[in-house]
Image (spheres, grey):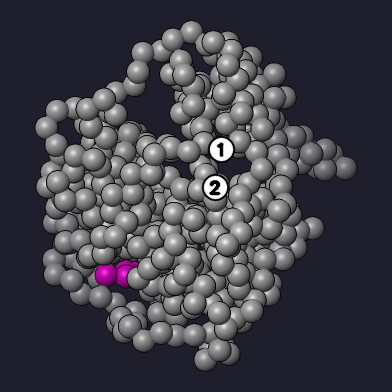
Amino acid sequence: MRLHTFRIGGVHPEENKLTAEIATVPAALPEKAIFPLSQHIGAPAKPVVQRGDKVKVGTLLAEAGGFVSAPIYSSVSGTVEKIDTSIDATGYRKPVIIVKVEGDEWEESIDRSETLEILDKHPELTPEEIVNRIKTAGVTGMGGAGFPTFIKLCPPPGCKAECVILNGVECEPYITSDYRLMMEHGREILVGLDLLMKAAKVNRGYIGIEENKPKAIALLTDLAKNDERVTIVPLKQKYPQGGEKQLVDAVIGRQVPAPPAIPVNVGAIVQNVGTAYAVYQAVMKHKPLFERYTTVTGKQIAHPGNFLVRMGTPFRQLIDACGGLPEGDNKVLAGGPMMGKSVMSLDVPVCKGTNSITVLTGADAHRKAVQPCIRCGKCVDACPMGLEPYLLATLSAFKQYDRLEKEDVTSCISCGSCQFTCPSHRPILDNILQGKGVVMGIIKGRAAKAKAAAAAKAEKK
């Protein structure tokens, strides 16, 4: 079996896939469900309900707040208790809708049967209709980025998609939610890929899966054996193989240029396997995105597992279902240990991008003492984007933002490979992200000024 991989950098963190062979079970309903209005990249959704309104599972709570945005649907039935603010995974208070749960009544338009629907049986599903259903259902990237899926299916002028690549890599340590999804819903994922291919008007589809998931590779290869348009691509085990630019390089051998270039600039549309499953449900089952597969894991968690979770369920409830927090020092992450965010409260709710809740304990929960840089260059060797992390971190610390922009800080994908490999335990990524945020603001401000100047010039004419 030939294994593919990306060409630049990468590291090999310990897997810790503790829950790989634990079947997914439905999580219990919460007493109250908390729905942040920013569960996606772009403008927050706008509430369409008020306090006291009755809602069902699948009722629209908030509509898209702009072109780059996505609607939010209720995952529970009950009464809208209030529209308020609450701390999210970033640690900031953000607008939310809180629903008091009363029973489990679903909207009648949702097809809850397990009958597999295939595209050949639905000639009414034109590319435009597929995109519209995906947009209406609020489907976003399920790998964590949260980019509205319909936008990826509508490439900018001058770009032409040639293939759709599904990301089944799941290279982040601990997380197994995508693996369980592939094992338990492989057929639906393949129909989702078929829908994405038709929507993108392409005839080539790939699913990239790392070699540490041989059962998933075998299963999906068997399920796709009669469709010559689809190829299952086994990949070497290397982090961050799941980064979309790294995945494009590994699967079709093309390297995506620096921002503002995106995968479609080299002919690829990349979606997560969880997104493909959500697309299947949205298009074929008229089911909005309001639940997802989530791993709850950690070396000291008594009963780690994989759950089908309704959006809005607090982290605390899922951790308690796994035996509660261990004694001693703990760090709870939304996501995995490489790219996950440490949460300030266990009342943070599961959102569209919550693929894992990871509990680090003891020494793993503490950073090691920072030592002076020894100029070893390991961070440079590890960077999958070909950057010089030590330099970017230093420029950021000294607020040299002009040079930071020239050194391509916007190409950083926040994978943490540099910080992981640093023998001096320096906060390289932390510094880079601070500087990147400032540079991104400068770039946006510059673009806004240029747009305003162009508009003023046009008015004078």
Q: Looking at the image, which is closer to me, 202 or 16?
A: 16
* Residue drawn at the location 27% of the way across and 28% of the way down: 365
Q: Looking at the image, which is closer to me, 325 or 436?
A: 325
Residue 63 vertical position relative to residue 89 in the rendered view, above or below:
below
* Residue drawn at the location 46% of the way across and 48% of the way down: 171
Amino acid type of the residue tagged 1 in the rendering: Gly
Residue 147 picture location, percent across and down: 52, 53
Queried whether the magenta region covers residue 61, the answer comes back as yes
Tell me which numbered mark, 1 or 2, is placed earlier along the sequence.
Answer: 1
Does the residue at mark 1 contact the one at mark 2 (Cβ under 8 Å)? yes
Please report the bounds of the magenta region as a residue range.
57-62
Residue at label 2? 241
Numbered mark located on residue 10 in the image: 1
Residue 34 picture location, percent across and down: 25, 51
* Residue drawn at the location 34% of the way across and 79% of the way down: 110
Residue projecting furthest to the top: 372
Q: Secondary structure at mark 2?
A: loop
